[in-house]
Image: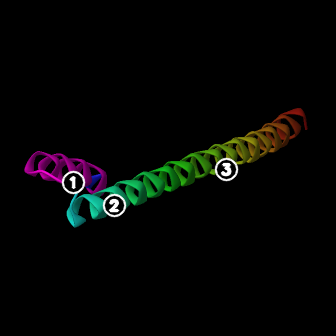
Amino acid sequence: MHPILYSITRFVLEFFRGELSTSQYISIVLFIGGVVLLGFIVRQGRQGDRQSVTKLRVRRRIKRKRLNLLFKKETNILQT
């Protein structure tokens, strides 16, 4: 986020100084790079969320199976 905000600020400051300078070109490149990097980070975060949700579902399923087995064992003991 910092490269994006810095590049916008730098571009605006250089714009008020006059003609298009090297700093403005660098700011444009930095802005584009920051946006691409931010998009990559957001995409990775979404994929991580999907994986964590899947892991949570698997854990719940395993827990349910264990509880069912435990319940069956207890009922078998009580019946004998």
Q: How is the image coloured?
A: rainbow
**Residue toward you, 25 or 51:** 25
Residue bearing the label numbered 3:
55
Q: Measuring 29% from the left and 64% from the top, which residue is drawn there?
A: 26
Answer few, some or many: residues within 10 Å of disc 1's Cα (few below 14, many 20 plus, some between 14 and 19).
Answer: some
Give amino acid for label 2: Leu
Answer few, some or many: residues within 10 Å of disc 2's Cα (few below 14, many 20 plus, some between 14 and 19).
Answer: some
Q: Measuring 14% from the left and 53% from the top, which residue is drawn there?
A: 14
Q: Is residue 24 left or right of residue 50?
A: left
Q: Is residue 37 magenta?
A: no
Q: Is residue 5 above or below residue 71?
A: below
Disc 2 + disc 1, Cβ < 8 Å: yes
Residue 71 in which image quadrant: top right
Residue bearing the label numbered 1:
6
Residue bearing the label numbered 2:
30
Range shown magenta: 3-19
| Residue 77 on image: x %, y % | 84, 41
Tell us which disc is closer to us: 3 or 1: 1
| Residue 31 on image: x %, y % | 35, 54
Disc 3 + disc 1, Cβ < 8 Å: no
Give amino acid for label 1: Tyr
Q: CA distance from mark 3 to mark 2?
A: 37 Å
